[in-house]
Amino acid sequence: MAKAVLTSKSDDFPKWYQDVVAKAELADNGPVRGTMVIRPYGYAIWERMQAELDRRIKDAGAQNAYFPLFIPESYLRKEAEHVEGFSPELAVVTHAGGKELEEPVVVRPTSETIINSFFSKWVQSHRDLPLLINQWANVVRWELRPRVFLRTTEFLWQEGHTAHATQDDARAYALRILHEVYEDFAREVMALPVLVGRKTERERFAGADATYTLEGMMGDGKALQMGTSHELGQNFAKAFDITFQSSTGTTEHAWQTSWGVSTRLVGALIMGHGDDAGLRVPPALAPVQAVVLLVRDEDGAGERAAAMVAELRGAGVRVQLDDRLDTGFGRRAVEWELKGVPVRIEVGPRDLAAGTVTLVRRDAAGDKTTVSVDGLGARVAGLLGEIQASLYRQALNRREANTIDAGGLAEVRDAAQRGFARVSWDSVRDSEVALAGDALTVRCLQRADGTIPSSSAEPGLIATVAKAY
RNA sequence: CGGGGAGUGGCGCAGUGGUAGCGCACCUGCUUUGGGGGCAGGCGGUCGGGGGUUCAAAUCCCCCCUCCCCGACCA
């Protein structure tokens, strides 16, 4: 039987997480506290995330652009709440070129200020609106307690910034991104169910009028904010003088949104689907969907394996051949398991003599089946769809099993030790500070039917309370 | 910033004044290959840094640095 390769999830969840990051070769810690080196396999996953998100972002009409890493410190100060929210975690460059700078420059913690300073130039007429811009970039927020992927001092993300002629248009766009880009990506690609709701005043983004969020439940019952979309109102438009002439000739301030998801999603992947054997990557996301594992190259097995790889590739499967015969079979099997590749196809002389291969699906540990080599491409393609659905179902079942309707504060505190506590917003509205004392936060507000409230003052709202990353 | 730990080979650790060790990893060879296989032989260390005590310091004393864990802010 296999030796334990990882710390068990139930023994020590944080240790398990670190083990998975190391053994699946996702990332290493960087030399500066809070920084990370994203290794090729981890980066391949991020590239897949980028590709799926980028397509959806463009489908929503936004275009990519790039703005500078360095921002004049004075820009940050222009929006009072914004600078207050970010100043504790800013990295500021005071010296460069061998001398002290006249004005310090900030390493961007987010790009609202610099992007909006250009929106101010670009927006003159209502015909310039809506202006829909996205940027893929790194940002820096000096973190006191970093954790790889989840909370790092430097991380990679996309940040969208838009300007609209009306509040309704801006609000509709913020929600469109939330549902059509982020929620769709989370469910369809990452196979993770998410609560989509509104942040409380306490939790919303510094400088926003409203923040919408996606909250996932991780394997230990804690919540992870997987993305946010903000209605910025006219706050930045006023601070940066983004005005336009309307069709009736009046001068108006633009209405804005911003929205982002980050490499934190890799952390969501690990903690949302991982098990005691390592990572489990949903097929729609996986850089490698299937691996053909050559057991021994006898009786033409090597050639047959290569042919299978070609057939699978032809069937649209992202497939890799593992013919490293100088490494033991068990070791290689464990490696692919750690990396969470959805399907493993084991090929050896024993199989080929019988005209079969051995299929192993990663979503159901130890589930090996023997199938005919005929029609392998179609079979595997179908299996990938099943695994995608199965991983979503497993994550949803876990969330439902760990979500409890709570009546009052005491029940909330109890339920939130294991998962999500759902409670009427009215009964905890005045208790957010008290809950914070127990490391609990209101993750989001939703209507009873799960839709998003237009204000936290709506009657009958449901608050989801949990511990969070 | 407050409280608690730890710095010894790539990783994880043992070593309480007397020749720096173990496991894993790595390299070589043989043997195995259907779940991290076996045997044999190897490479690799200014014991976080500086100062002090001593015939002798990884070990005792002083100073400094770094990292990790727990609390207040955050995608």
Image (spheres, rainbow, N blue to C red):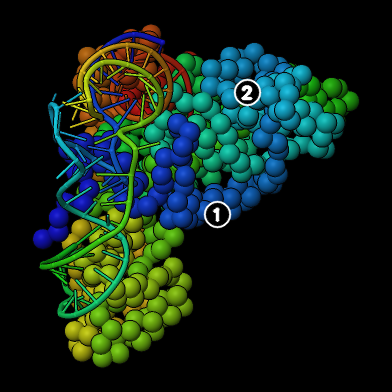
SS for dot 2: strand
User: What chain letter is assigned to the residue under label 2?
Assistant: A
Q: Residue at x 62, y 38 (%)?
A: A160
Which residue is under mark 2? Answer: A92
Q: Is the residue A384 above or below the residue B24 in the image?
A: below
How many C-alpha atoms fall within 10 Å of the one at disc 2: few (<14), some, or many (≥20)? some
Looking at the picture, do discs 1 and 2 lie on one chain?
yes
Q: Quadrant of the C terminus of chain A?
A: top left
Q: Residue at x 57, y 20 (%)?
A: A86
Q: Position of residue A262 (x, y in %)?
A: 50, 40
Which residue is under mark 1? Answer: A51
What numbered label is drawn on residue A362?
none
Q: Is the residue B32 above or below the residue B39 in the image?
A: below
Closer to the camera in the image, A243 or A149? A149
Q: Position of residue A434 (x, y in %)?
A: 33, 9
User: What chain letter is assigned to the residue under label 1?
Assistant: A
Q: Quadrant of the N terminus of chain A?
A: bottom left
Name the mark nearer the viewer: 1 or 2.
2
Quarter of the rendering containing residue A353 = bottom left
Closer to the camera in the image, B53 or A169? B53
Q: What's the residue type where badge 1 is placed?
A: Ala
Closer to the camera in the image, A314 or A124? A314
| Callout 1 touching callout 2 (CB < 8 Å) | no
With A317 as the anchor, is B45 left or right in this view?
A: left
Q: Position of residue A29 (x, y in %)?
A: 42, 40
Q: What's the residue type where badge 2 is placed?
A: Val
